[in-house]
């Protein structure tokens, strides 16, 4: 499991069989510096969840990781790639976490609800 922020808006595309999948990049920070992780999600509920996010949104991802090697401009590079199995999104709040760098993660607030009204007639004859 890792947490970070969406590096850019996710991309949702259909597979050759017609099922949608989502690809997205997550930037996470640690003692060694920043790391960009390439992610992909297949199940419909995860595709919908990723589709509701945008660049800068906070996210935690659990899944299967693979280290991929590629070449760019003649230089060998590596990238961590994750097939997402579970996701949790967060609101990003400046100054929380990451040493006050302004990229901290805080849970999104729960929607406001109104308490249920108390009925005028309340039965005091409870048998216990």
Image (cartoon, rainbow, N blue to C red):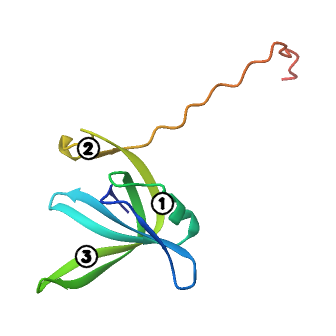
How far apart marks 2 and 3 lie (CA) works out to 25 Å
Q: Secondary structure at mark 1?
A: helix
Q: Is residue 102 above or below residue 51?
A: above
Mark 2 or 1: in front is: 1
Q: Which residue in the structure is indicated by mark 1?
A: 51
Q: Position of residue 15 (x, y in %)?
A: 51, 81
Q: Secondary structure at mark 3?
A: strand
In the rendered image, the quadrant that contains the C terminus is top right
Residue sitting at the far left? 74
Disc on res. 113? none
Real-space Cα separation, disc 1 to disc 3, in angstroms: 23 Å
Mark 1 or mark 3, which has the lower sequence index?
1
Q: Residues within 10 Å of mark 2 (few under 14, many from 20)?
A: few
Measured as percent of width and height from the top left, residue 10 is found at 40, 63
| Image coords of residue 53 (percent x, y) | 43, 55
Pointer 3: what residue? 79
| 50, 89: nearer the viewer | 50
Q: Residues within 10 Å of mark 1 (few under 14, many from 20)?
A: some
Task: Classify residue 76 as left or right of residue 90.
Answer: left
Q: Residue 74's image quarter?
A: bottom left
Is 71 in front, or is 59? 71
* Displayed quadrant of residue 108: top left
- Residue drawn 88% across the image and 16% down it: 125
Q: Residue at x 48, y 60 (%)?
A: 51
- Considering the image in quadrants, where does the N terminus appear? bottom left
Q: Which residue is mark 2?
A: 97
Please tell me which of labels 2 and 1 falls first in the chain.
Answer: 1
């Amino acid at each position: 499991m890792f947490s970070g922020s969406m590096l850019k808006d996710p991309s949702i595309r259909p597979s050759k069989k017609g099922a949608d999948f989502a690809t997205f990049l997550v930037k996470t920070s640690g003692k060694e510096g920043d790391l960009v992780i390439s992610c992909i999600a297949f199940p419909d509920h995860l595709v919908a969840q990723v589709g509701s996010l945008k660049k800068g949104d906070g996210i935690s991802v659990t899944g299967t990781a693979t280290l991929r090697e590629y070449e760019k401009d003649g230089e060998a590079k590596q990238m961590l790639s994750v097939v997402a199995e579970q996701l949790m999104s967060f609101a990003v709040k400046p100054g929380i976490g990451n040493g006050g760098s302004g990229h901290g993660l805080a849970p999104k607030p729960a929607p406001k609800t109104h308490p249920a009204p108390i009925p005028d007639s309340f039965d005091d004859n409870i048998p216990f």
